[in-house]
Image: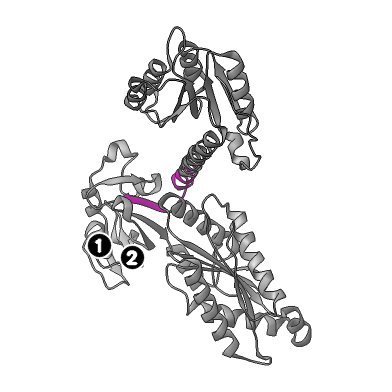
Amino acid sequence: MKVEMNKWTDDFPEAMKEITILCVEDESDARDKLSGFLGKNFGVVYSASDGIEGLEVFKSEKPDIIITDIQMPLMNGLEMAEEIRKENADVPIIITTGYDDEKYLVGSIDIGAMKYIKKPVDIKKLRSLLSEVALNIIQQKEKAKKDRLLRLVMENSAEFYLITDLEKIYYMNTAFLRYIGYEDMAELGTRTAVLEGVNILKDGSGYCGADLKSWLKKAVDGNLDEAVLKMQGAGKLKSEAKNFLVRLNRVEEEHSVLVSMVDISTLETASAIGETPAMVDPLTGVVNRQKFLEELDRELYRVQRYTRPLTLILFDIDGFSEINERYGRQVGDSIIKEIAQLVRQNVRVVDTFARYGGEEFIILAPETDINGGFQLADKIRGKIERQQFPHVGRVTCSFGVTEYVLLQSRDLIIKTADDALYMAKSRGRNRVEKVTFL
């Protein structure tokens, strides 16, 4: 194989180093040259000189991408690809050949090759194709990893999780299974009838159903996102009923809904006797940093899996250290509390609003793009600016807004919001700036 020695630029993302490739070519010089190019940009490159060896390497190493010649001794590329398809129907296979014969083109299509490239191989075209394929693989790996992590989190959580289309149950975590008297999904099956055994004694949403299944149907039909329910589990006494904060996230692509339920009975009891729950900031009564990060992880999983918009708003009080120095910490605390109360009145029930630390606050806004986040931030900014605070009068805040971008980590999206906040500070304070990670 003649390989055109065009420069293969070094702009592959670092994540490409996690991709493994199998290169099958019977000409040793061509195989070495192509493997050399691939080795500079991908994690591991396996090579084989014929179809039999290539099949053995595939079975033992499970590479992410296969590039193979057609005409080879012992077993040709199409025969090898056909055997590989029996093992893995989805692995990307790129066929290279010096032949124009239509039978090879038809054969490569029949075995599901994603691309048929004629020799001599144009490295630029191959590079472009590999970039597209590798990015898709990286996204799939990230999704699979996050699926595993979220499943682990949900399985070990005391909260209840349920995924259903109201006809079948696709997932229920261990805590919820045990609440309704089952050990595992194998015992439960997919029957939603089991939800009829959970009684709704009281709700604050305006929807009243005799059981959880009928309540969920009314809630979904009525586009309800959040409610507080008093639930009595199957086989339990009314005196054992507990209050749950129930949230519904619709998964439109799969025509299902993710239901989460948090037992807030202990929270309400703690409030009644003056104790502070671990998830609440003691000064303001809003969610604290730790709980916010848990909610952010949960939302990041959702938007990564279902490709939904998500915006983060980070803001703080302008000149707060000077306020503390001039008026004292008690006045500073009262301002923090009043701002928290004002913001709570201006965010949706599906948003998560938290005190992030000191005079810094953060808002997580699901189903909101960066422009919607900017409008929300500017509305809150204006309300704070117009508020008259005891002792100090006018107080302002600066806001940084960002929207989640695919493959962005939790730390990175927070840092991007912080960069936007810094920009707002440096451009004069009492303003909103937005930054999108590129």
Q: Position of residue 367 (x, y in %)?
A: 42, 64
Distance Cα–Cα, label 1 vs label 2? 10 Å
Q: Quadrant of the C terminus?
A: bottom right
Q: In this rendered view, identify the residue nearer to me: 114 or 303.
A: 114
Find the magenta span and give its range: 149-163
Drawn side of residue 169 relative to residue 404, left or right:
left
Q: Residue at x 47, y 66 (%)?
A: 369
* In this view, 83 is above or below 17: above
Q: In this rendered view, identify the residue nearer to me: 150 or 73.
A: 73
Disc number lying in front (1 or 2): 1
Q: Residue at x 27, y 73 (%)?
A: 206
| Numbered badge on residue 229 | 2
Q: In this rendered view, identify the residue nearer to me: 9 or 62.
A: 9
Do callouts 1 and 2 mark residues in contact (Cβ within 8 Å)?
A: yes
Magenta-span inclusion, residue 241: no
Rate crowding at label 2 as few (under 14), some (14 to 19) or many (20 or more) other CA atoms within 10 Å: many
- Report the residue marked by disc 1: 215
Residue type highlighted by circle 1:
Trp
Drawn side of residue 407 relative to residue 33, left or right:
left
| Residue 200 appears in view | yes
Q: Position of residue 256 (x, y in %)?
A: 30, 53
Q: In this rendered view, identify the residue nearer to me: 345 or 437.
A: 437
